[in-house]
Structure formats: structure tokens, C-alpha cells
Amino acid sequence: MNVLIVYAHPEPSSFSAALRDRAAEALRASGHEVAISDLYAEGFNPVAGRHDFHSVADPDRFHYQSEQAHAAREQAFSPELVREQRRVAAADFLILQYPLWWGAPPAILKGWFERVLAYGFAYVDGHRFDTGLFKGRRAMLSVTTGGTTERFGPTGVYGEIDRVLWPVQRLTLQYMGYEVEEPFVAYGTPRVGDEGRAAYLDAFAARVLAAAAKPVDRSRRVDNPLDLVPADAWAQQR
């Protein structure tokens, strides 16, 4: 299986990095191919704009989805986006590894969603969720928190973790058609001590190996998403 780990943490010695490395090591030892997008280390720019493209659909009005559709048709995405889209397209199994900051992913990862998972590449009209373009593939969140398990429990002050992770799980990954595994959450990582963190590492390695062992149905994939879109679809909406 081809696995992509998208890692969003600025500190190389973080526990998020330890989880990333342990997953990659376990997967490679089991014969899987692993690629890593280290967003901070690679200097990924999370800010969307005309710099995303090297051709223009409408020079007078910047409509982001229209420009994305044009770039997908003309192969006009910037080199940074082409690199990331190629990694995503090659992956049978996508793992998002990040710390929970202010109840959400770091801004760099949100920007990666917006710029890389472009219209015409990751989604098109009429093909979402069960008919999404990434059906036949698997995805998983791996999240570290400062808050304890109790704070994310049914009566916790932060709300249940499934609700906190809903926007990424449902409105990003499942929206694109991914089969989404149960998230792996390392709660209270600054508080659990070395023994607790070692247990998290072992548990995460087991989880990713179990997920990667499941078969994937490559026959369900869409080769060219833009074949599903009328050529003038966005022009009619400007």
C-alpha cells in the first residue's frame, strides 16, 4: 500500500513527530511505501491566491474555484501544489498528523486543505461523500492534545472529541470519498509521562498497521475528475 503522512508541527522533536516516525517505521517494515509531507520543514505556504496558478481564467475577478477548475484543465497549478497533489493522488492511505490547536488543525494544515484539495482535483459537483473522487481509499487522523481524556469526554468542558474532529473527518475527508478510520488521539501528551507516551507510540503503530492491512478497491477510483464536469460549468456561475 502507498501511504502519505501529512505532518503539521513546527518542532522536529515534538511528540507529533515521534508518532509520525513510529508510523512510518512500522509501515515500511511491513512492506508499505511511505511518503511524508512535512509542511513546516518544506515551507508550505498556507495562503491561497493567484500565486497558486501560472495561468488565469478571469483576470478581472478572482473566483478561487473557477481558477482551480481552469488550472486542473490546463495543468496550471504552481509547482508546490503539483508536488502535493501528486503525493495525494499516489496514496491509498492518507494519515493526517497534527496537534489540536484552538480546537482545530494548525493553520498550515487548513491552508493545505484549501490549496491542495482543489476543485477539479479532489472534488467536483455531484461527486461527494459516497460518490466522492477518493472513494476506494482510506484516511485517518492522528491528533495530539494538551487536554486530558476527561476534558474531551461526554461531560468534558471541551466537548466530545468526535464533535471537535467532525469538520476534518466529515467535511474534508469523507466529503472527498475517503473511508475514514477511527481517529487516533494521544490525549494530554505533556501530562502522561514517558511511559504513557511510549504506550501511545505502540498503540499508534498497531493502529496504522491494522488499517493498512485492509484491502483497497482501486477499481472505484476516478482517473480524471474533470471528465465529470461540463466545460462551462463555472463560467455559468460567475
Image (cartoon, rainbow, N blue to C red):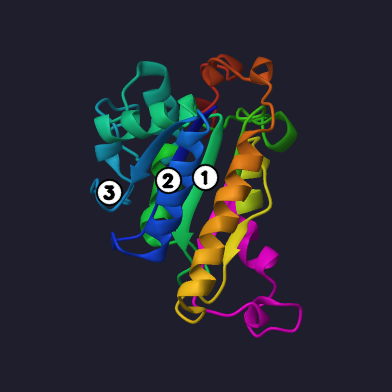
Between residues 6 and 106, which one lies in front from this camera angle?
6
Residue labelled with disc 2: 6
- Amino acid on which the number 2 mark rests in the picture: Val
Identify the secondary structure beneath mark 3: loop
The part of the image, by quadrant, that contains residue 25 is top left
Residue labelled with disc 3: 45
Real-space Cα separation, disc 2 to disc 3, in angstroms: 14 Å
Between residues 73 and 215, which one lies in front from this camera angle?
215
Identify the secondary structure beneath mark 2: strand
Q: Mark 1 or mark 2, which is nearer the start of the sequence? A: 2
Disc 2 residue crowd, few under 14, some 14–19, many 20+, Cα 10 Å:
many
Q: Is residue 83 visible?
A: yes
The reply to whether dot 2 and dot 1 touch (C-beta < 8 Å) is yes
Location of residue 40 in the rendering, given as x and y in whole percent from the top left corner: 28, 53
The reply to whether dot 2 and dot 3 touch (C-beta < 8 Å) is no
Q: Which residues are magenta?
A: 140-168
Residue for point 47% across, 35% down:
29
- Amino acid on which the number 3 mark rests in the picture: Asn
**234 is higher (above) or lower (below) than 107:** above
Residue labelled with disc 1: 95
Q: Is residue 118 visible?
A: no
Residue for point 45% across, 70% down:
101
The image shows a total of numbered marks equal to 3
Disc 3 residue crowd, few under 14, some 14–19, many 20+, Cα 10 Å:
some
| 225 relative position to 159: left or right | left
Q: Nearer the viewer, mark 2 or mark 3?
A: 2
Disc 1 residue crowd, few under 14, some 14–19, many 20+, Cα 10 Å:
many
Real-space Cα separation, disc 2 to disc 1, in angstroms: 6 Å
Q: Mark 3 or mark 1, which is nearer the start of the sequence? A: 3
Real-space Cα separation, disc 1 to disc 3, in angstroms: 20 Å
Location of residue 179 in the rendering, given as x and y in whole percent from the top left corner: 68, 38
Residue for point 37% across, 25% down:
71
